Image (cartoon, grey):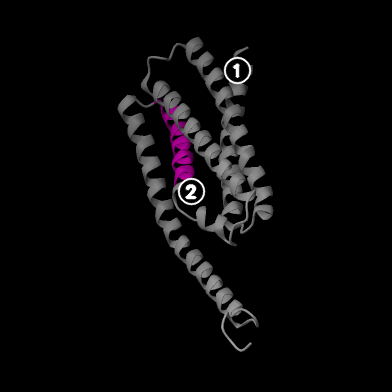
Amino acid sequence: MRTFVLFTHIVGAMLLFASFGTEWIGLRGLRRSEAGEAASPWLALFSSALRLYLVALAALLLSGAYLATNVGVWQFGWVRVSMATLVITTVVGVVMGLRERRSYRRASNVAFPSGRLARRFGGTWLPVSLAIRGAAALAIVYVMVAKSDLVLSLTVIAAAAGLAGLIVTFRSARETQPIAQRQSHRESVGAQAAALKPGVHTGGCV
């Protein structure tokens, strides 16, 4: 029984990191989409990550609780910190993902200017959230291997999440500016082209 539970725990961890990868791929596709139809496949991929998160969380929590009880390690700080961090990061990821999925679906049902999706998801907070959660999950793996005490476990997870958040914030800020500049240039060119078309001007000879 313990072998099967340990196997389930490892599979749950693999699913969790697969969820991070799926969310990252879907998010990149959504940020590059400029129309609702083009964004649909990426939205489906993004949504699948949310389901994977829930499956991974259930597998990790149930198997982890069984193993911790069976071995008798609930009193150790690394166990409590790991379980709490896992629940918090997964719940935050699912809640944020569901909110953004609703926003995408509303946008895909109405007419919107080209590039609206790219501008909305060209910001930094979504990739930063993903980076923080991914780094925290990696830190959990380290904490479980090292079997750190409570203070060190909290320090390692907080440091990993904070560093990842800062790096991605800096990179996303650098990437967002060129996207906004290119979109502004396209809109400017489109406006100039529309102004040159016959019959656009309200004035003129009768």
> Residue tagged by mark 2?
127
How packed mark 1 is, by other alpha carbons closer than 10 Å (few <14, some 14-19, many 20 or more), is some
Q: Position of residue 191 (x, y in %)?
A: 56, 75
Asked if the residue under mark 2 is in contact with the one under mark 1, i.e. CB atoms within 8 Å, the reply is: no
Q: Main secondary structure of the magenta part?
A: helix
Give the camera-side residue of 140 and 46: 46
State the residue at coordinates (55%, 44%).
103
Which callout, 1 or 2, points to the residue nearer the camera? 2
Residue type indicated by callout 2: Pro
Q: Nearer the viewer, residue 8 or 25?
A: 25
Q: Where does the image place residue 72, in percent across and percent down from the top left? A: 45, 11
Q: Which mark is residue 5?
A: 1
Query: Among all residues in the image, which is located at the extreme bottom?
Result: 205
Disc number placed over residue 160 in the picture, else none: none
Residue 97: percent from left, percent from top: 54, 39
Give percent across and percent down for residue 176.
47, 60
> Which residue is painted at 36% across and 30% down in the image?
153
Image quadrant in which the N terminus is located = top right
Above or below, 66 against 125 in this view is: above
Number of numbered callouts drawn? 2
Identify the image quadrant of residue 144: top left
Give, as a single range, the part of the protein colored magenta.
126-147
